[in-house]
Image (cartoon, rainbow, N blue to C red):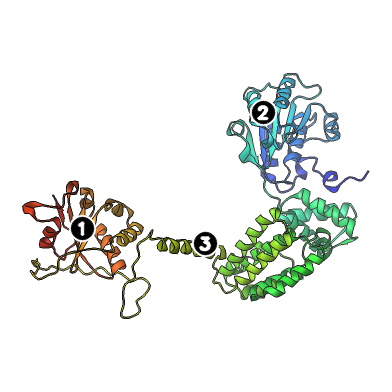
Amino acid sequence: MYTALYRKWRPMTFDDVVSQPHITATLSRQVADGKTAHAYLFTGSRGTGKTTCARILAKAINCLNPQGGKPCLECEICRAADAGTLSDIVEIDAASNTGVDDIRELRDSAIYTPELCRYKVYIIDEVHMLSNAAFNALLKIMEEPPEHIKFILATTEVHKVPATIISRCQRFDFRRIREEDIVERLLYIAENEKIDLKPDGAELIARLSDGAMRDALSLLDQCVACSEHIDAEAVSAAAGVAGRDYLFDILSFSAEGDAAGAILKIDELYSKSKDMSRLCDELLIQLRNLMLIKTVPDKPKLMSCLEGEAERLKEIAEKLSLGDILSKLGILRDCAEALPRAVSKRTELEMAVIKLCAAKGAGGADISALERRIDRLEREIEELKRGETAFRPKKQTTEPPPRPVYNPPEPETREEQPPKSDDPSPQRCAEWESILDRLTAENPGCAGALQGSEAYVKGENLLILVKNEFFLGLFKRPENAASLKKAAFEVTGINYSLRAKCVKGGEPESRGGKSAVDELIEKAKSADIPVDVE
């Protein structure tokens, strides 16, 4: 029976594990020194060697003739473990055994000593799939394990594992396997399997595998079935990804704003049964290359492209700003997240490509952000129509700027001038609510203290009656008074002098039968708000 490459070439000892030296060296040293922990937690993305290292560790701690902390692969323990007939190494798939009864059965069997080995090892794969009750049952035996028991837990979603479990394990985080290590391993396996694998084909497989060695070997197996000579073109055909020219054509059309040309390319690829999700991923990789060209042009090793493609990428990058590239990356990222749930993947990708073309010349603006701003402005306009926000446009003899620039006047000393007898009586300030709204954006604390206040206008004096003495204390600070003057100027266009008076209990009259407004008029000065508390 044919054995898949990823099974046939699974590492048998720590020396065969790729790109995880920080883990294999530590585990080998622990085994050699006889200081292994009772529980381990292996985390990381798929295909990075978690289960493989768990099996190697289980063999190493039970090996009859360990070689520097590594299994010898020749003793009866190692041979039985590799054949899967060793009863003392138990592998449990937590995705299929999620219930508390499964863990209770494990706990009951753990009290028995091993048959052949020194330790009984339980490897629990995808441990995050256990139920809460199962985790609680597992926690009990992990707190006080028998001396002959070892646990090795593996998971791709460590955030779902309870902290009480994690704290009782030695945790090892597996990294994504580097592309150069995957290429080297693929070429080594191809040479031993008599497979005609070209370097450019190995590089493309390494990129498509996204740091997972198992995915890379599975794709190599698929390519072997499609072609005798495996180069980049054969890999593209076998994996259903876009050919390299198609990728650069689509990026060129998006840089030029040619939506029709980009859609025609998508249609051509779709008619050839190209996978839309793979195509989106490939476009993301190439846009990342464009971003790197713009930001770190002197670091070509960071780019993920084949030889000869860098020059064409540079040509496309010259047509775009960094802001444009970042905007396009955001559009494709949203598309990649939506594709798994999309009813029509083709339509979803076409929508994204049209947005890529529309983003040309937008100065890097995020289209979705612009749409949100438009929606917000439309809501504010509706609120204004319903009268929820006071707004009165000012009559201007000449066209004013959208928002006047406030320049605080230079402080100056003026003699107090009594109001003239023929001055008109004070008028209620019609824009007071709008001034408070503007002040809320600038200084919400002071705006809150002015709730329930009234304001009157007398010439260039703004007379404020408040019911809260706290407000007067706040405006002893010049910056608070300046905030109010600025808000009043931005709403009315007038640089008012401010006076304030606290009327306790809402009493409008003051000493001598004079109103609080009259008293403020008599004391009106051009200085910032004086404090008058009655």
Q: Is residue 483 above or below residue 32?
A: below
Query: What's the mark number on residue 372?
Result: 3
Report whether 74 appears left or right of 319: right
- Closer to viewer: mark 2 or mark 1: 1
Q: Amino acid at mark 2?
A: Ala
Q: Which sits in the foreground, 313 or 71?
A: 313
Q: Is residue 92 above or below residue 455?
A: above
On the rendered image, what quadrant is the N terminus found in?
top right
Q: Amino acid at mark 3?
A: Arg
Tell me the crowding category of disc 2: few under 14, some 14 to 19, or many 20 or more residues within 10 angstroms, Cα based: some
State if disc 2 and disc 3 touch (CB < 8 Å).
no
x, y percentage for residue 47? Answer: 74, 46
Most distant residue in the front direction? 386
Residue 311 in view here: no
* SS class, disc 2: helix
Q: Amino acid at mark 1?
A: Ile
- Real-space Cα separation, disc 3 to disc 2, in angstroms: 45 Å
| Mark 2 lies on residue | 134
- Real-space Cα separation, disc 2 to disc 1, in angstroms: 67 Å
Report whether 128 appears left or right of 80: left
- Real-space Cα separation, disc 3 to disc 1, in angstroms: 38 Å
Q: Which sits in the foreground, 38 or 167?
A: 167
* SS class, disc 3: helix
* SS class, disc 1: strand
Q: Earlier in the sequence, mark 3 or mark 2?
A: 2
